[in-house]
Image (spheres, grey):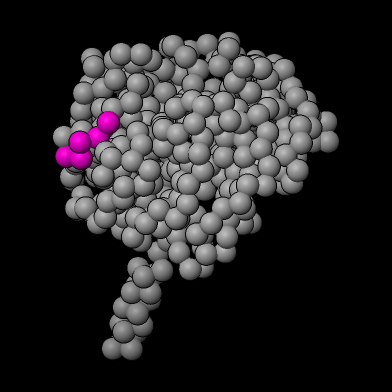
Amino acid sequence: MRKPLLFAIVILFFSACTKKTEVNQWRGDNRDGVYNETNLLKEWPEDGPEQLWLYEGIGNGYGSPAITSDKIYVNGEKDSLSHLIALDLNGNLLWESEYDSSWVVNFPGSRSTPTVIDDLIYVCSPMGEVVCFKAENGEKVWSVNMIDDYAGVITRFGFTQSLLVEGDKLFFAPGNKEKNVIALNRFTGKEIWASKANAEKPAFCSPLLINLPTRNLLVTYSEFSLFGLDTETGEMLWSLEDSLVDIKGNTPLYEDGYIYATSYGNGTVKLKLSEDGSKITEVWRNKNIDNIQGGFIKIADKIYGSGQQKLMMKVLDASTGEFVDSLDVKRGVTIYADGLLYYYAEQGGFMSLINPEPNFEVISKFRITEGTKEHFAHPVIKNGVLYVRHGNALMAYNIREEV
């Protein structure tokens, strides 16, 4: 009897040790707007895909939802206070936790997407409250405040960072001249290191994690620069001036040794990153894709994203930086799944399904009519469902192809 029992214990121990951490965060697994989904509809009915449900009451805001295997988490502002809301996958309210004052000046509402790591949720309020919650019931585990605890600098639209996690570290940027970027222990909230970086204000950017053989990098924008930090020590490795406009809401992208970054004013830049992550070399720059917060997508040898002043989607050659094509779909948010682009336009709230190639064209579109205020939130795709947040409303659409 002892051998079967011992075997069972070994199997349970092995399973526990090899359990993969589930991460759900801003713009997908790699923060690049690419959702690894298959068997999705290749065109939609004239009035759009089937709406599975609508939940009105998440509060004002522009942050995307984070979708796990069984729950949905989203930030919202209600009565000038920040709330974290949990729904089940049928759009039913599970719990709601109030955690800070919110932004009520210009574009009132929440800004960021919750970061969910297994059974813990990490959020940042527009006023700088960084909180760890239990995913099961919304109970607060710990919190720090960027203003009160780190003498942070409030920006003209509030803090908008969707928090980044690496192992046991959680990163955020209060913008203090001495403690500009912070790494905390994500389980306790205790400081691990503080980096001076460029001693600039935050720039509305949610950072990117780059994993290299010899070190890992945190790459993000501050007020007038793009920079890379060593995630183990906080050492600043390199910096690139980007001084025209202080609003930089797009997470950079990394692929095969190159960093791509887009900002309003300076446009899109491609940088060669050295093997050890310590240096960058500019490869090209193009101002056609220069949106503030709509993101951009790299698919094969093309980059897709909208212009800020010229209200259309643009295409660049990723190798040369040359302009390739454009499509009149106004300014908006770009994501990608199963071979097609999903584009949520600020003007009119149209959601378009776009074929990137060989014919760059709109296949289908429908209008988001429920909800409030601006169409800024980035859509999310999870398990064949398209989630769209419009102000106080969250909608779920069935985009799975029946087989």
Please give the name of the residue rendered at 75% of the width and 43% of the height, measured from the top-left corner: 320
Q: Main secondary structure of the magenta part?
A: loop
Please give the name of the residue rendered at 34% of the width and 55% of the height, measured from the top-left corner: 234
Tell whether 233 sits left or right of 24.
Answer: left
Q: To which quarter of the image does residue 366 belong?
A: top right
Tell whether 101 sits left or right of 345.
Answer: left
Rendered view: 214 above or below 311 = below
Which percent across, then down, holds residue 23?
Answer: 42, 50
| Residue 112 visible in the snapshot | no
| Residue 192 visible in the snapshot | yes
Residue sticking out furthest to the right: 358
Name the quarter where the N terminus is drawn. bottom left
**Is 104 covered by the magenta stretch?**
no
Which percent across, then down, holds residue 193?
Answer: 26, 55
Rendered view: 357 above or below 214 = above
In the image, 345 versus 367, the foreground residue is: 345
Name the quarter where the C terminus is drawn. top right
Q: To which quarter of the image does residue 400 belong?
A: top right
Please give the name of the residue rendered at 83% of the width and 31% of the height, measured from the top-left corner: 359
**Is 150 covered by the magenta stretch?**
yes
Which percent across, then down, holds residue 323?
Answer: 76, 32
In the image, 229 versus 73, the foreground residue is: 229
Which percent across, then down, holds residue 78?
Answer: 26, 18
Tell whether 96 sits left or right of 48.
Answer: left
Q: Which residues are magenta?
A: 149-153
